Amino acid sequence: MNWDQIEGNWKQFKGKIKEQWGKLTDDNLDTIAGKRDQLAGKIQESYGISKEEAEKQIEEWERKHKDY
């Protein structure tokens, strides 16, 4: 799975994103609209972590959901 697939099916992935990062609101997810860089920024902001850590978490999430 690549990020283009996630972006194209964002509505389906929103629930899985919210399971992983529960601090993100529905409004956050609507604003992100599948944009990976915006997701990283919101994770960074909501959890008070570095950009590198947010990217690492996204990469782990992608690996976990590669067969979706």
Image (cartoon, rainbow, N blue to C red):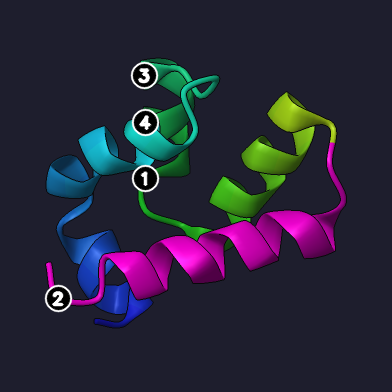
Q: Residue 42 carries which label?
A: none
Can you say which quadrant of the picture contains the C terminus? bottom left
Q: Is residue 64 left or right of residue 8?
A: right
Separation (CA) of disc 4 from disc 1: 13 Å
Mark pair 4, 3: CA separation: 8 Å
**Camera-side residue: 48 or 42?**
48
Q: What residue type is labelled 2?
A: Asp
Tag 3 residue = 26
* Residue located beneath label 1 in the image: 33
Q: Is the magenta stretch mostly helix, strand or loop?
A: helix
Residue 53 forms part of the magenta stretch: yes
Q: Residue at x 49, y 33 (%)?
A: 21
* Foreground disc of the pair 3, 2: 2
Q: Distance between the residues labelled 2 and 4?
A: 18 Å
Q: What residue is shown with label 4?
A: 18
Q: What's the CA distance linking mark 2 and mark 1?
A: 21 Å
Q: In this view, does 8 lie to the left or right of 29?
A: left
The secondary element bearing badge 4 is classed as helix
Numbered disc 3: secondary structure: helix
**Mark 4 in CB contact with mark 3 (< 8 angstroms):** yes
Q: Name the residue under label 2.
A: 67
User: x, y (%) of residue 50?
Assistant: 87, 51
| Local SS, label 1 | loop
